[in-house]
């Protein structure tokens, strides 16, 4: 499936389904303030997959947890900004109303399929629970629907698997079951946090394909969080690259891979191993480290590692600026397209 | 436990298969079943009224005649009848106290562990305070104010021995609540109460079950202890504890009067402990090997 064929049904049309504005999580860690997520904004449209990519600690998972309002105390009081889903600001909802949306309108798949299922509840029951809770189905209807969901995620012998405990399933099967649970109520938005990281490469491809297939069938929007650019290339319509709590580049997937503008994105793409790289030269890497919480510079957080840094970079953090159609970059000296 | 209730029939079969391999547990289960049956049918099995005095037949030795298979005590009462009826009392107290202990301990443990923060601190300091007092002392103080009936004895034992259970449950919950499936349940809209009692508590069933069986055993011991001291089950009602009290005056001359109720207590305690062990191994699906 080429990137061009992956245009979502209503791409660019209509109001975004999920709209995130200036979302921030500043954690006071005396004497510093850890800017784990530092004012990010993005839109997600119906039927669209937005890839959120970045290295460990860039704030991807915290962003997902803030969207779902799943941060535990004492962090739960810290998020700032707006998350508007279908006209409702999730950040100001009380817990009871947020609870009613979770699993029904916005759902989540976690990274670790081995531990994300309740070990002492059958798979069928785990799929049926949200159906009973949110859609008011009877246990019998919910059980039937659970089997249908297992069939939908291509689990062989769904009747047997519905009555099985999670420890009897392989990692790939469990992730399929997780997806079945998350999508059982046909949520408008699915947040998938590294859904394939813990799986074999071949299983990875199957799971990604399954997500795409279910998206086309249900029209859900997917926020796909990963550190793996290959996953993004295969699945996403648009990509947002995060670095040190900020989005540094956002673009349609084809445009980003063909012509990355931010030096960090270019570095990421250059450091992907390629078979055709001859001779087997050293893999290019980005020098330096992500700045720690205390020594985040006033200007661009990437400056110290950047080969294109200019004198203005230290003064102020660059805003996201539109450099092409749908292609936004936060850089004072972006590379040519 | 709801974990067992939720198992489909084939699962019960698997649990039984695993349980059957645990020989000591089978022996424990047999002993417990025997004790429960003998307690339940004590009036049927008992050859005599346990309170019937017959001063002409004092201190009959066991196996001497068929009218008194296990002999008679210092007042000529039939020992077997008293053991059977005493077992009824001891097991009732043990089970009611265990239910009280486990319910209180589990509730306090899961509340402290799941909610955390100042609630956790408050509850755990309360536990520490309760543990500062020797349990027998607590029991005797309460017994001085509450008239000793079977129910009050059971509740008093239960309400003075839940602290360990609450610590066990809290520790288990602290470990469980960090697991991904709890976050996943929240992401699917499960409420706090639902997560506490449907996701977490059944997962803590194994240690609770083990604690529960141990608590039956220790409640039986505790009942014997306070009855022995005279604050528990009151004569003429027989209990293994007050049988021991009566026997202590004749320990050098008529040792079987002490040995028989002592053996009954030991057998009960061991039976419940082995049973709990086997149940833990058989019920925990994470330890289950067969598909």
Image: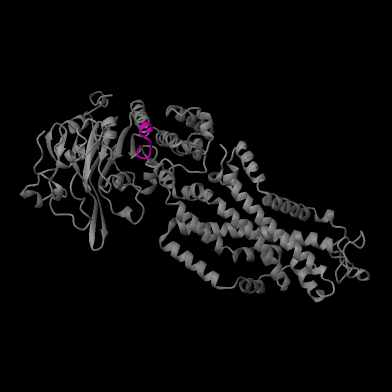
- Using the image, determine if residue B22 lies above or below residue A175: below
Q: Position of residue B248 (x, y in %)?
A: 78, 74
Q: Which residue in the rendered view is the most extreme toward the right? A: B56
Stretch in magenta:
A196-203
The answer to whether residue B16 is left or right of residue B205 is right
Q: Nearer the viewer, residue A318 or B260?
A: B260
- The prevailing secondary structure element of the residues shown in magenta is loop
Q: Position of residue B265 (x, y in %)?
A: 73, 63
Q: Position of residue B56 (x, y in %)?
A: 94, 70
- Using the image, determine if residue B45 lies above or below residue A106: below
Q: Which residue in the rendered view is the most extreme toward the front? A: A279
For the C terminus of chain B, the image quarter is: top right
Q: Which residue in the rendered view is the most extreme toward the left? A: A311
Does residue B178 show up magenta in the picture? no
Q: How is the image coloured?
A: one colour
Q: Name which quarter of the figure residue B80 lies in.
A: bottom right
Q: Position of residue A59 (x, y in %)?
A: 26, 47
> Can residue B88 be seen from the camera position used here?
yes
Q: Nearer the viewer, residue B24 or B101?
A: B24
Q: Nearer the viewer, residue A246 or A48?
A: A246
The answer to whether residue A327 is left or right of residue A72 is left
Q: Name which quarter of the figure residue A114 lies in.
A: top left
Q: Nearer the viewer, residue A95 or A191?
A: A191
The answer to whether residue A243 is left or right of residue B82 is left
Residue pictured at 43% horizontal, 43% vertical: A116
- Total number of numbered discs in the rendering: 0
Residue pictured at 39% horizontal, 32% vertical: A186
> Can residue B239 be seen from the camera position used here?
no
């Amino acid at each position: 499936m080429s990137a061009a064929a992956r245009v979502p049904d209503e791409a660019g049309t209509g109001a975004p389904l999920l709209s995130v504005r200036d979302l921030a999580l500043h954690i006071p860690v005396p004497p510093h303030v850890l800017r784990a997520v530092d004012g990010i904004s993005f839109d997600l449209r119906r039927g669209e997959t937005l890839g959120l990519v970045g290295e460990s600690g860039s704030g991807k998972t915290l962003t997902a947890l803030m969207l779902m309002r799943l941060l535990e105390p004492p962090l739960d009081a810290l998020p700032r900004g707006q998350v508007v889903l279908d006209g409702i600001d999730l950040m100001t909802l009380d817990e009871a109303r947020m609870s009613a949306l979770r699993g029904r309108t916005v759902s989540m798949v976690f990274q670790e399929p081995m531990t994300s299922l309740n070990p002492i509840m059958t798979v069928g029951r785990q799929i049926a629970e949200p159906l009973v809770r949110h859609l008011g189905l009877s246990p019998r209807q919910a059980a039937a629907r659970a089997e249908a969901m297992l069939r939908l995620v291509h689990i062989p012998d769904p009747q047997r698997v519905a009555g099985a405990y999670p420890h009897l399933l392989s990692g790939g099967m469990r992730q399929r079951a997780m997806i079945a649970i998350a999508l059982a109520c046909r949520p408008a938005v699915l947040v998938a946090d590294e859904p394939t990281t813990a799986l074999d490469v071949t299983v990875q491809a199957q799971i990604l394909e399954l997500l795409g297939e279910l998206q086309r069938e249900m029209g859900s929007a997917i926020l796909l969080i990963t550190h793996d650019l290959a996953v993004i290339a295969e699945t996403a319509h648009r990509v947002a690259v995060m670095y040190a709590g900020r989005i540094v580049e956002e673009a349609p997937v084809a445009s980003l891979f063909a012509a990355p503008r931010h030096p960090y994105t270019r570095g990421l793409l250059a450091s992907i191993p390629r078979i055709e790289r001859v001779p087997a030269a050293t893999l290019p890497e980005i020098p330096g480290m992500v700045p720690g919480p205390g020594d985040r510079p006033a200007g661009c957080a990437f400056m110290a590692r950047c080969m294109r840094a200019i004198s203005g970079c230290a003064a102020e953090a660059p805003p996201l600026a539109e450099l092409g159609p749908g292609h936004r970059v936060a850089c004072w000296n972006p590379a040519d397209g | 436990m709801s974990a067992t209730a939720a198992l489909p029939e084939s699962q019960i079969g698997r649990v039984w298969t695993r349980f059957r391999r645990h020989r000591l547990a089978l022996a424990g289960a047999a002993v417990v079943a025997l004790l429960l049956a003998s307690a339940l049918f004590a009036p049927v099995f008992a050859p005599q009224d346990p309170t019937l005095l017959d001063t002409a037949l004092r201190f009959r030795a066991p196996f001497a005649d068929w009218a008194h298979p296990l002999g008679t005590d210092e007042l000529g009462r039939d020992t077997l009848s008293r053991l059977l009826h005493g077992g009824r009392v001891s097991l009732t107290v043990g089970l009611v106290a265990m239910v009280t202990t486990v319910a209180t301990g589990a509730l306090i443990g899961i509340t402290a562990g799941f909610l955390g923060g100042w609630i956790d601190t408050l509850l755990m300091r309360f536990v520490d305070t309760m543990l500062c007092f020797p349990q027998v002392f607590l029991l005797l103080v309460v017994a001085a104010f509450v008239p000793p009936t079977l129910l009050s004895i059971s509740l008093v034992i239960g309400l003075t021995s839940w602290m360990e259970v609450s610590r066990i449950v809290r520790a288990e919950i602290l470990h469980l609540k960090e697991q991904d499936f709890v976050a996943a349940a929240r992401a699917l809209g499960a409420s706090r109460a639902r997560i506490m009692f449907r996701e977490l508590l059944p997962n803590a069933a194994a240690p609770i079950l083990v604690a529960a069986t141990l608590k039956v055993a220790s409640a039986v011991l505790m009942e014997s202890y306070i009855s022995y001291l005279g604050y528990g089950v009151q004569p003429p009602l027989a209990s293994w504890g007050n049988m021991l009290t009566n026997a202590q005056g004749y320990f050098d001359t008529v040792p079987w009067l002490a040995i028989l109720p002592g053996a009954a207590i030991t057998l009960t305690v061991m039976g419940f402990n082995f049973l709990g062990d086997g149940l833990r191994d058989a019920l925990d699906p994470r330890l289950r090997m067969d598909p």
